[in-house]
Amino acid sequence: MESIKRLKCDSDFFGRVLIGGVVHREYTISNIPAKFGCKKFGETDGIDGWYSNHKAGVVYVDEAQYFPTW
């Protein structure tokens, strides 16, 4: 099992965590982005890969892969 380390984040909509040396964004189920769960979202790419923690009600999205401009 990989360790999860919380990182400092100023956003109200997502948190940042480090999982196995890779930075992920942590979203609660009520705050997931509109492009979540699909390969294409209109003209842009969607988010089709994530980790989830069902007990905590959050999903973790790879920041470098799905949010390269951040």
Image (cartoon, grey):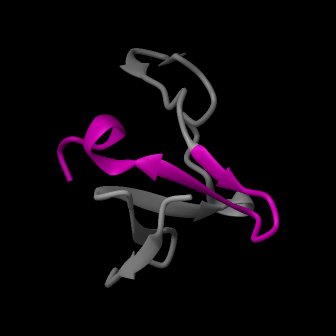
The magenta stretch is 51-70
Seen in the picture, residue 17 relative to 49 is either above or below; the reply is: below
Please tell me whether residue 43 belongs to the stretch shown in magenta. Answer: no
Q: In the orientation shown, which residue stands out farthest toward the left?
A: 69
Residue at screen point 20% across, 53% down: 70
What is the quadrant of residue 29 in the picture? bottom right
- Residue 53 point in image, percent of width and height: 71, 59
Residue at screen point 30% across, 43% down: 67
- Residue 60 point in image, percent of width and height: 53, 54
Query: 41 or 3, which lies in front?
Result: 3
What is the quadrant of residue 69 in the picture? top left
* 15 horizontally vs 63: left or right: right
* 52 horizontally vs 6: left or right: right
Query: 39 or 24, which lies in front?
Result: 24
Where the N terminus falls, by quadrant? bottom right
What is the quadrant of residue 65 in the picture? top left
Residue at screen point 52% across, 17% down: 39
- Residue 5 point in image, percent of width and height: 41, 77
Q: In the orientation shown, which residue stands out farthest toward the front?
A: 1
Q: In the orientation shown, which residue stands out farthest toward the right?
A: 55
Seen in the picture, residue 35 relative to 6 is either above or below; the reply is: above
Please tell me whether residue 55 belongs to the stretch shown in magenta. Answer: yes
Query: 12 or 57, which lies in front?
Result: 57
Badge count: 0
